Image: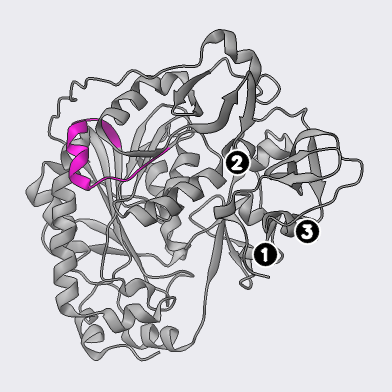
Amino acid sequence: MQLPETFIESLLNAPGFDKEAFETIHQSGEQVTSVRINAAKYRYVHKLSADVNNLFFESATPVPWSSKGYYLSERPSFTLDPLFHAGAYYVQEASSMFLEQIVKAVFPDHSAKPYRVLDLCAAPGGKSTHLSDLFNEGLIVANEVIKTRSGILAENAIKWGNDNLVVTNNDPKDFQRLQGYFDMIVIDAPCSGSGMFRKDGEAVEEWSLQNVEYCSKRQQRILEDVWPALKEDGILVYSTCSYSTAEDEEIADWIVENFSAEHIAVPVQDDWGIVESVSSGRKLTCYRFYPDKVKGEGFFITCVRKKSSETMTDLNAKKFSLLPNKSRGILNDFIADNNALDFILKAEETIAVKKKWLEDLSWLFSCLYIKKMGINIGKILRDELIPSHELALSMLMVSDFNYIELNKEQALQYLRRNDISIQDAKKGWGIMVYKGYNLGWVKVLTNRINNYYPQSFRILKQ
């Protein structure tokens, strides 16, 4: 790979930059593949209270800054792995998993308290699903401004199966309506993309100093738009996949200079290879990931705490229509424990949400365009639930159900929406399962099995 001369020249004074090592690693053709295990789903599937190690890939090694992250020795065909479609793991770039260290440093009680978190530029969903695991008692708003990408984000949220993810399709300035609402805002900002050169050859062709400048202005505009939504003492995490200081340390300085904010340093182990840079203006500690120093792609991240006071907006919450208590019995054959849940009736769909978040969801619904919230459990027609794909992939299902275990060949046939034959299958609704992980619904009739895997999710690759 030939890197632009102007690009290399622009980095000569960047903190931690080693020209020779940087060029060598880019010319080597080396590729790094990493995944993050869905530990909550693993424990749900296998009924374990203990933590989980990677059990899906041979010769996998841990990502040092992520408790559930693993490097793979080679890149498999994820499309042809049923566990990928079941949400057993997420294919995520290792450097970006460092977000976990920031969360643990600034929110030691992250897994126990109901924090509100916004992932502003969330597609395709790596950081959002990570946050939903870390803040398992919290509410995660995963936003994507581009409509097509918000659909991909919603699909990945469905596969992950957590009920605390809300997917929205809004412009950053729309969040000003939620003044002082969020405990944490994560902005993985649109950037010039130089950190992804090894994975994306087109990014090399598109890079220019003019684009860096354009991205820097855009990043400032995004930060200005969303800052009011962060509460006092709330945490802003800013990251890019760019090496350019104009998009990185200079933006960190700009945040502190333009808003009432104080910088937060995060503990980093020396043997991780992460460069702790210091901004030239306000001397802020930031974190740089170079592929010649870490096993991962180019990445930059820093965080600040908001010191100015914001009064939370008094919102006129939209009232939801809820499933009457007398109808809840219809769900008993499907949902394990619905006492902590409310069921919102939205058009023909029934949405399961935690009772403690009902008021918050009504506020969000009043301000934002919501593509997904809670778990869509399906339609209730004539006192019968027609279950949704989302329910099958969630962790709400009862353990005593018609689960049909498949081998890999059968699972792939199911995921392609092909006809499938199962010996002595119990009649009625059933869930196809691979290695204990739910794949989706079928309905077993007298003379055939109807495949209910969503057409839009089906595997096309042979």
Amino acid type for the residue under numbered disc 3 = Lys
Identify the image quadrant of residue 182: top left
x and y percentages locating residue 290 in the rendered image = 38, 72
Q: Residues within 10 Å of mark 3 (few under 14, many from 20)?
A: some
Marks 1 and 2, the one that precedes in the sequence: 1
Please state which of residues 277 and 160 is positioned toward the viewer in this rendering: 160
Which of the two residues, 345 or 118, is positioned nearer the viewer here?
A: 345
Instruction: Give the amino acid at mark 1.
Output: Leu
Secondary structure of the residue carrying tag 3 is: helix
Q: Nearer the viewer, mark 2 or mark 3?
A: 2
Name above or below for residue 64 compared with residue 225: below
Protein image colouring: one colour
Residue 169 highlighted magenta (yes or no): yes
Name the residue beneath numbered marker 3: 408
Query: Looking at the image, is 61 positioned above or below residue 377?
Result: below
Q: Is residue 74 above or below residue 233?
A: below
Specify the segment rendered in magenta.
166-183
Dot 1, crowdedness within 10 Å: few (<14), some or many (≥20)? Answer: some
Residue 389 circle label: 2
Label count reads 3
Q: CA distance from mark 1 to mark 2?
A: 19 Å
Residue tagged by mark 1? 80
- In the shown orientation, is residue 188 left or right of residue 410? left
Residue at 83%, 34% (x, y): give it.
427
Residue 297 visible to an observer of this rendering: yes
- What kind of residue is marked 2? His
Q: Position of residue 188 (x, y in %)?
A: 31, 55
Task: Looking at this view, name the residue that lies furthest to the right.
Answer: 424
Distance CA(mark 2)–CA(mark 3): 20 Å
Q: Quadrant of the C terminus?
A: bottom right
* Pointer 2 with pointer 3, Cβ within 8 A: no
449 with respect to 247 (left or right): right
